[in-house]
Image: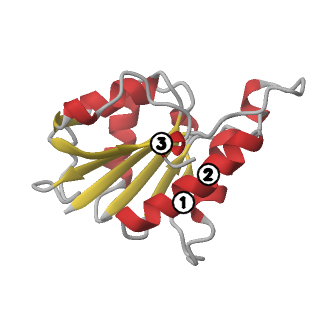
Amino acid sequence: MSKLILIRHAKSDWSGNVNDLQRGLNKRGYNSCRVISKELKKRINKPNLFLISPALRAKLTYENIFLNWDDKDNNLFVEEDLYHASIEQIEKKLASKVLGFSTVVIIGHNPILNLLMYELTTKGHNKLPTNLVTCGVVVIEYSKNNFKTPVFTNGEVVDYFFPRMYM
């Protein structure tokens, strides 16, 4: 069974005068990453593919959640398309990257993640939020696909959690 994990970047730091791509995380964002890392370890096996937005806050979210999982060989791709991408662009990216992997993580932004979590699933919509909060996690399972075919519309939402549930 394959899993797709959608994670919205952690809370960003608006204190500096930097462009949107260069905004880092604030203190709450770093704390949220620690909480989510701990909770993810309880729920999933170590992911074997990461598709990350080029925004600094997305990269820092990845580093602070996953780099302490003792895996030096992460398949990490910083994907320009994940910054202001369309659903079609992300689906094409998935089709070209995920074949053969079992657990894939996408770290990106709203509003596209809000749309994507519904587009990629047919079951479990009652577990989805109307707005994916910062550092919120949606776990989607594909029991029939197993990432052997590039079709991602038959997923089932099996989990949704976010930092404030544990803080």
Q: What's under tag 3, amino acid-wise? A: Phe
Residue 98, compared with residue 108, is above or below; it is: below
Q: What's under tag 1, amino acid-wise? A: Ser
Local SS, label 1: helix
**Which quadrant: the N terminus?**
bottom left
- In 3D space, how far apart are the residues under numbered discs 1 and 2 (Cα atoms)? 6 Å
First of labels 1, 3 by sequence position: 1
Local SS, label 2: helix
Residue 71, compared with residue 49, is above or below; it is: below
Q: Residue at x 51, y 49 (%)?
A: 166
- Residue that label 1 marks: 37
- Residue 162: which numbered mark, if any? 3
Is 60 left, or right, of 41 in this rendering? Answer: right
Residue 62 visible to the viewer: no
Q: What's under tag 2, amino acid-wise? A: Cys
- In 3D space, how far apart are the residues under numbered discs 1 and 3 (Cα atoms)? 11 Å
Check disc 2: other Cα within 10 Å, few if <14, some if 14-19, many if 20+: many
- In 3D space, how far apart are the residues under numbered discs 2 and 3 (Cα atoms)? 10 Å
Is 114 left, or right, of 26 in this rendering? Answer: left
| Relative image position of residue 102 (x, y in whole percent) | 30, 65
- Residue that label 2 marks: 33
Check disc 3: other Cα within 10 Å, few if <14, some if 14-19, many if 20+: many
Local SS, label 3: loop
Dots 1, 2 in contact, CB < 8 A: yes
| Relative image position of residue 125 (x, y in whole percent) | 21, 31
